[in-house]
Amino acid sequence: MVDRAAEAGVDAVKFQTFIAEKFTAPTDPARFARLQKFQLSFDQFAELAERARAKGLMFFSTPLDLDSARFLATIVDALKIASGDNTFWPLIECCAESGKPMIISTGISGQADIQEAVDRVSAIWSDTGAAQDLALLHCVVSYPAPPEQANLNAIRSLTSAFPDQTIGYSDHTMGLDAAVAAVAMGARVVEKHFTLANDYSDFRDHQLSADPEDMARLVQRIRLVEDMAGDGALGCLACEEDLVTPVRRSIAAVRDLPAGHVISADDIVWLRPGGGLAPGRERDILARKLTQAVAGGEMIRPEHFENG
C-alpha cells in the first residue's frame, strides 16, 4: 500500500496504531476479535515508516492509546488525533509532550471543545519549547458522510476561528469531489482513506476509500486547484496584459464632427479599443472647440483641440 500510494503522488501516508485491549472494551467478542486482526506490532510500524521514507513520503499515524502514542513519537513525522478522541485529554497531552507536529480532526465537536484541545496542546508546547505546528481538520464522522452534510463551509469557519493553525479536511464522503472542493475552500491538508481495492472486503472503509487510480486522480485534481488558486493578489495578470488595450474603451465621436465644433455630451460615445482618452476624462474635452474634424467612431484626442 505504501508503494502504491507513493506511485499515486501523495505527500504522506497515515496509519492507525493501537493495542486492542487499551482501545475498546471486549463486550462484543466478534467485533473485538476482528479489531485484533487489524492490530500491527510496533516493529511492523517501524518497518512501514522506513518504507515510507524510502519512497519519499512523510509517515504519520493515529495512536488510539497512550502506549501507542509514546512509541509512535519515536518514528513518525507527525501524530494525528482522531475525531472520536479530540476530547481524550490524556492522549492529546501525551502526544503534545512528544513535541511532534500534531493533526487533530474536529468531527463531532463544537468550537469550545476544539479551542480546549488547541489550548492544551499550545500550553504544553509553550512549556517545553516545542515548535507550534498544529493542524485542524474538518471532518464528518459518518461512513460514508452524506454529501449534503459534508459542511465544507466549516473549513472557512475553522480558518476564521483559528488563524494561527493550519486548516485541512479529512474526507469520509464517497468519491473525490468533496476533497477537491475542500482545497478550493482553503484546506491545506487533505486526508483521504486509501485501499488497494474497494471490494477488498465488506468493511465500511473500503467502499469510501480511494483506490490507487482514484488517489492518483485526486492528487492531480488537487494540484490543479492549487495552481488555479493563485496568490489572491488583485491586478492585471501576465496572461491578460496583451488584452488590456483591446478590451478597454476610449472616448470617441458619435458622428462626424467638423472643425470648430464645441463638444457636448451628445457628441461622445465610448468605444473599444482603449489607448485614447479613458472613460472618466470627459471633462477634459466637454465645452472645448475642435481645431480639426473628427470622423464618427474616431477617438477624440487632446491634439484635436487648441493647446492640446
Image (cartoon, rainbow, N blue to C red):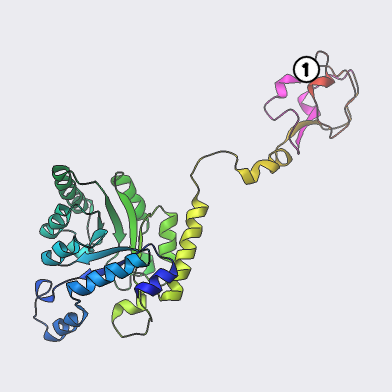
**Residue with the mark numbered 1:** 287
Badge 1 marks a residue whose secondary structure is loop
Instruction: Residue 41: name its quadrant.
Output: bottom left
Give neighbour class at mark 1: few <14, some 14-19, many 20+ (Cα, 10 Å): few
Q: Is residue 187 above or below residue 241?
A: below
Main SS category, magenta section: loop
Comparing 15 with 81, the one in front is 15
Q: Is residue 108 above or below residue 122?
A: below
**Relative to residue 304, is residue 13 drawn left or right?**
left
- Residue in the picture at 14% in, 62% down: 70
- State whether residue 106 appears in this view: no
Instruction: Residue 12: name its quadrant.
Output: bottom left
Q: Is residue 156 above or below residue 77?
A: above
Residue range (magenta): 260-287
In the rendered image, residue 268 lying in the magenta stretch gets the answer yes
Instruction: Residue 269: name its quadrant.
Output: top right
Comparing 192 with 150, the one in front is 192
In the rendered image, residue 270 lying in the magenta stretch gets the answer yes
Task: Tell me residue 159's x, y (percent).
Answer: 33, 48
Three-letter code for the amino acid on which mark 1 is drawn: Ala
